[in-house]
Amino acid sequence: MAGRALALITAAAVAALALGPLLVVAGSADAGAMRPADWAALRFTLVQAALSAAISCLLAVPVARALARRAFPGRGVVVALMTAPFILPVIVAVLGLVAVFGRAGAANAVLGWVGLPPVSIYGLSGVVTAHVFFNLPLAARLILAGWEAVPAERLRLAASLGAGPWATFRLIEWPLLRTVLPGALAVVFVICLTSFAVALTLGGGPRATTVELAIYEAFLFDFDTGRAARLALIQAALGLGAVGLGLLVPMPRLAGGLGRAPRRWGGGGKALDAVLIALAALFVAAPVVAVVLRGAVHVAALPPSVWVAAGNSLLTAAASAALCLLLALAIAIGGGRLEEGVGTTAIAISPLVIGTGLFLAVIPFVDPAELALPVTGMVNAVMALPFALRFLVPAARRIRATQGRLSASLGMERWTRLRIVTLPGMRREIGAAAGIAAALSMGDLGVIAFFADAERATLPLQMYRLMGAYRMDEAMGAAVLLTALAFGAFRLCDGWGARGAGRAWRVRRAAA
Amino acid sequence: MRHALPLILAAVPAVAEDRPVLEVYTYDSFIAEWGPGPAVEKAFEASCGCDLRFTAAGDGAALLARLRLEGARTDADVVLGLDTALTAEAEASGLFAPHGIDVPPLDLPVAWEDDTFLPYDWGWFAFVHREGFEPPASFEALADSDAAILIQDPRSSTPGLGLILWVEAAHGVRAGAIWEGLADNVVTVTRGWSEAYGLFLEGEADMVLSYTTSPAYHLIAEDDDGFRAAPFEEGHYMQVEVAGMLAGTDRPALAREFLAFMLTDGFQSAIPTTNWMYPAVIPEDGLPEGFDTLVTPSTSLLLPPGEARDRAEEGIATWRDALSR
Amino acid sequence: MLRLEGVRVEREGWFLRADLAVPKGAAVAVMGPSGAGKSTLLSVIGGFEEHAGHVLWEEAPIDGLPPGRRPVATLFQDGNLFPHLSARRNVALGVRPDGRLGARDRARVDAALEDAGLGRFGDRLPGDLSGGQMARVALARIAVQDRPILLLDEAFSGLGPALKAEMLDRTVRLAAEGGRTLLMVTHEPEDARRICPETILVAEGIAHRPVGTEALLSDPPEALRAYLGT
C-alpha cells in the first residue's frame, strides 16, 4: 500500500532527524565514563518526572470530573484556558510562576497578610510546581476527553439501575480512569524528563541537576562529548520506554468533544465541583496574567530588532507547523502503531543533542548561520510531532472506521479520498495540531541558539538577549509579545479547524 | 534600518563584494544591537578595507565548545570573548597562535603576560543590591546573615564560575566551609547571568552575583542610582575578557590588525556603555561619567590560567557537595 | 447473472459457504438468524470480505476488483453519507468519485435530487436533514451510480414503518427502472413477501440458493422457524 510506504518513509525520516544527531554526537567521541554526579542527576530526573506526572494526573482527575459533570456559563473559556500553559513559552511561564509564587510574589503576599508562613518556589517543590502548572491542564484535557467518550447508553443504564455515586464510580469511572490514566501519566512523565529551563531556574541548586543539565555540563564545561552522548542515550532510552508503555494503552482523543456541553451525570457535590474548577482556572491563569500585567506597557517601546525577531519567529512557526502537519498526516493516515511510535520518539531526545548533532553534521558543508531558521523550523516540527500525532492518529482512525467502506464502495482513488473525505473529516484535529505545532515552535529557544547570528534570531532568543543586557522591562514586553503570538497562532489554527467541524459534530450526534 | 531586511538576506550569501572577510567568533551579547558589535564593526571597517563578520555562539564557554567542535576546519580568524577561566584550555587546544603584536600599556589592576591572548575588557565580580539594603562585607558575614542571594551555575555560566574561583582564591582550603555557610542564603542557582539578574530585578532576592559595574548601567542607561555593589574585605575576583587569533587563519595580517585595533579608542570607547565592563585601555576621553561612583575593591584576585582550571574543578565539586546537602 | 462459486469465509469457529446464482434483474431477500452471515454474504459481493472461491457477474469474475470497481452499489445500515459534504456533493460522488463534475453531470445530479423530492435541500448538510431525507439522498446517489447490482444491508432500519415502506418502494422502483439486480437483507417477512419473489436463506453456515419467498415463509425449515418465532 502506497499510504503505508509513505508513512514508513516519513517515520524513517523523523527517526533519522531525531536519532541521527545523537549517533553523530556519539560517533564523534569515545564513550565517556559516567560520574557519580551523573547518577545523582538521573535519580533526580526520575524522581521529579515521576512526582510531576503523578501530581499532575492526580489533581487532573477531580478537575476533569468536575468539568465533565457540569454545564455553566464560561465553561468553554475554562476549557480553552486549559491549553494555555502548554503553549506558553517556558521562560515566560517561569517568570509568571515567579511573579505569583516567588518570594516577592502575589501568593506569598496573601499568605503573609493572613499570617501564614511563605511558600518557596525554589527547589524540588518549585520544579514540580512548574511542571504541574504545565501539565495539569494537559492531563485534565486527556482525562476529560476520556470522560466525554463514555457512551450515553452506559450512563442511562447505570441511572436506570439506580446506581449511586460509589456504584457509578465502580461501574463507569474507574474502568474509564484505568484506560486513560496510564497514557496521561506516560505523556507527562516524558515531557518532564527532558525538562531543562524549569529545573535550571527553579531548581535551587546542584541538587536539582537533571540529566539534560548534566548533558549541557558535559558538553560545555568538560567538553566531554562522549559522556554527553552516553547521558543523552540514557535519557532517550528512558523516554522511549515511557512512550512505549504509554502506547500500549489506548489513548482517548486529545481534542475531541471539548466544546461539547456535558451530559447529565446528575449527583451532588455541585459546590465542590465549582471550587475545584475555580482553583484550577486560577492556578493556570494567574501566572499568565502576571506576565501580561508586568510587560504589556513595554510592548510599544520594543526595539526594531525584536519585531524582526518576531517576524522570523512567525515565519519559522508557520513553516514548522506546515511541515509538522505533513509528517503527522502521512503517519496518521497511512501508518500503524510502529510509525506512530517512531514519530513520538523525538519527545525523548535531548534538544541540546539534536542541535549539536545537526551542527556537526552541517558544518563541513555550510555556514550554520545560513541554516539557522530552516533548521530551527525543522527541529521544532519534529519536536511538535508527538503532540500532533496525539490529535491526528485517532481522527484518522475514526474516519477510516466510519467512512472507509462508503469511500471504497464509491471507488474513490486514494488522493480523491484524501481530498474529499479524510482531510475535511479531520479538519478540527488538523487545526488543533497545527495550532499546537505553531505555538510550540514560537516559544522554543532550543536549537536556534546553536546557529543564530545577530540578524537571524527568533523572538525567544531576542527576549533572552534583552534579559542578558539588563533590559528586564523590554524582555517582559517581548514576553508579552511572544505570548500573544503563540496564543494568536494557536487560536487562528484551532479556530479554523473548529469552524468546519462544528457542523460535523452535529451530524455525528444526529446519526447516533 | 540595518535590521529591516534580514529575512530576505538570510537566503542570499552575505558577501557581495571582493573585500577580504575577517571572521570573528564571539559570544551572543557582543553582537546584539545594544552590544559593542555594531560600533566596533563600523569603526574597524572604516579603516581596514575589509568586511568584518561576527558569528555568535552563546557565551564564552559555548564559544570555546563550538571552536573545539569545529576544530581545524573552523572559518574563524579571531575569537573574541574567552575569559581567564577558559584561556588555559583554549591554549591547550592548539588552535590558537601567538598574537605577535606590540601591546600598549594596559589599564589592568594586574600584570598581563600572555603571548596568545590579549585582554579587551575586564571587571570585578560583586554582589549587587538595591540602595537601602545593608550588605554584608565579606563571605563570612554573608554566610552569617540572612541575606537572600541569587547565583549562577558554574557549569553553565561565566559569573557562576567566577564565584567559585573567587571563593577558592580568597579562602582556599576553607572554601567548603564558606559554601556550607552560604547554602541557606542561596535562593536559587540559575543557568546564566540573565535569569539571576532578571529574578533579582523582580525582587526575588536581596543580592545577585554580578559585576561592580552593574550599578553603572542603571545609573547611565536608566538614570536610576538605586543600585550598589557590595565591597568585600577579602577582595574581588576578576574577569578578564580576551581575544586571540587562530593558528589556521588564512588572513594572519588582517587578524593582527584587528587585535591591534582592539586596544585603540575605536574599540575601547565602546566597551563601558555597551558591555558595561572596564576597558583594557582607558580611552583618551576617560571613563564615562557615572563610572566614578562605582566601588573600587582594595584587592584584586585572579588565579593564573593554568591554576584556574584545576581549582575550578575542585571548587565545583566542593560547591556541589555543600549545596547538595 | 450473479454467481457465487465455492465461496467460503472462515473465522475462528465460524464459517459461511455459498454456491448460488441470482438471475439478472431479480429482487432477492436475504434472511436468516442473527450472526448466520447475511451481512457477510453482502460484504463478499461488495468486496469488503476476504474469501475463498469466486464471485462472477455475467460470467466474468469480479472478486479481484476493489469495491469501487465492482458493478455493485451498497446501502449500509448507517453511514451512507459523508457528514461534512452537502446533499448535492454526496450525490455527485455517485457520478464521479473525485467530485469533479461537468455541466451534464451536474444536471444529472440535480435531476436525481429533484426526483427524490430534495430539490430545495441540495446545499444542506446531512446533519440538517431528517432521517427520511437522508435516506432519500442516499437513494438519489444510488440512482446516478449506474451499478447493475444493488445491495441493501438492513438499510432504512432506523426509520419508522411508513417511511421505511416508502423507501423500500423507491428502491424497488429504482431497481426495476434500471434493470438492476437487488439483494436485500431483512428481518421482516412482510417486506420480503411484498418486494422479493425469491429469498436466500442464510443459516448454519450455508447461504442457500434462492427459493420462492412465499413457499419458504409458509413452510420454513427448522433454523428459520426458530428465528421467525412461528
Image: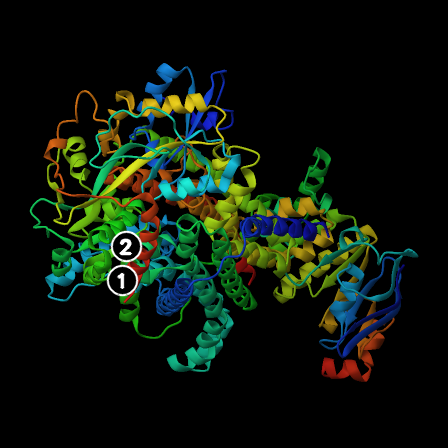
Q: Subunit of mark 1?
A: B
**Helix, strand or loop status at disc 2:** strand
Q: Position of residue B230 (x, y in %)?
A: 13, 46
User: Which of the image's four quarters has the N terminus of chain B?
Assistant: top left
The residue tagged 2 is B189
Viewer-proximal residue, A38 or C38? Answer: A38
> Going by the image, does A338 lie left or right of A142?
right
Same chain shared by disc 1 and disc 2 = yes
> Circle 1: is it few (<14), some (14-19), or many (20+) Cα within 10 Å?
some
Q: Is residue A173 above or below residue C222?
A: above
Q: Are marks 1 and 2 in contact (CB under 8 Å)?
A: yes
User: Which of the image's four quarters has the C terminus of chain B?
Assistant: bottom left
Give the residue displayed 61% in from the left and 61% down from the top. Answer: A337
Give the residue displayed 85% in from the left and 76% down from the top. Answer: C215
The CA span between labels 1 and 2 is: 10 Å
Viewer-proximal residue, C56 or B104? Answer: B104
Q: Is residue C7 above or below residue B9?
A: below
Give the residue displayed 93% in from the left and 57% down from the top. Answer: C59
**Helix, strand or loop status at disc 1:** helix
Q: Position of residue C223 (x, y in %)?
A: 78, 82
> Going by the image, does A177 lie left or right of C143?
left
Residue B261's quadrant in the figure?
top left
> Circle 2: is it few (<14), some (14-19), or many (20+) Cα within 10 Å?
many
Q: Amino acid at mark 2?
A: Val
Give the residue displayed 59% in from the left and 46% down from the top. Answer: C86
Viewer-proximal residue, A138 or B46? Answer: B46
The residue tagged 1 is B323
Q: Subunit of mark 2?
A: B
Q: Position of residue C99 (x, y in %)?
A: 67, 42
